Amino acid sequence: QVHLVESGGGPVQAGGSQRLSCAVSGRFFFANDMVWYRQAPGKERELVASMSRGSSTNYADGVKGRFTISGDKVKNTVYLQMDSLKPEDTAVYYCYLRTWPEGLDYWGKGTLITVSS
């Protein structure tokens, strides 16, 4: 079983910064990708940022240049550094991974970021 636990959510002023963490535990060989998603009130869940096993990264257009995904293999933790936050970044942020070779999907329970103007 694999567990993902997000932390770092909370209220923040527009223009501010916040760093989210996703602590990964459990037994698996590899994760194909580590991904941050978010779901704003009344909207569908959307991909925010991803990092492949080879450490290449990908970002949603709306967060490019403001958000940075990174990982610490020693701590088994994935981070999402969020800068220049906007009210439209308000959402519950979820951590996700798919294991390799099993292809099993795991989600965290999410952490809420509320950006006020």
Image: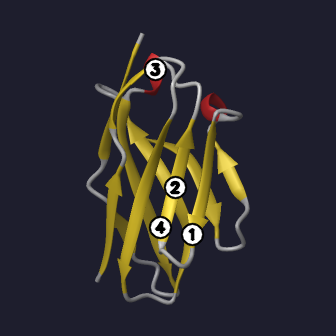
Q: Is residue 113 left or right of residue 60?
A: left
SS class of the residue under badge 3? helix
Query: Which of the colour schemes (rainbow, by chain, secondary structure, one colour) is used?
Result: secondary structure
Q: Are marks 4 and 2 in contact (CB under 8 Å)?
A: yes
Query: On the image, numbered disc 4 is attached to which residue?
Result: 77
Q: Is residue 19 left or right of residue 25?
A: right
Please tell me how crowded label 1 is: few (under 14), some (14-19), or many (20+) other residues with Cα within 10 Å. Answer: few
Q: Which mark is first along the chain, 3 or 1?
A: 1
- Compute the Cα span from label 3 to label 4: 26 Å
SS class of the residue under badge 1? strand
- Compute the Cα span from label 1 to label 3: 28 Å
For discs 1 and 3, the disc positioned in front in the rendered view: 1
For badge 4, the amino acid type reads Thr
Give the quadrant of the N terminus: bottom left
- Compute the Cα span from label 3 to label 2: 20 Å
Residue 111 at x, y percent in the picture? 31, 45
Query: On the image, numbered disc 1 is attached to which residue?
Result: 72
- Compute the Cα span from label 2 to label 1: 8 Å
Query: On the image, numbered disc 2 is attached to which residue?
Result: 79
- Compute the Cα span from label 4 to label 2: 7 Å
Query: On the image, numbered disc 3 is attached to which residue?
Result: 88
SS class of the residue under badge 2? strand
Give the quadrant of the C terminus: top left
Q: Are marks 1 and 4 in contact (CB under 8 Å)?
A: yes
For badge 1, the amino acid type reads Asp
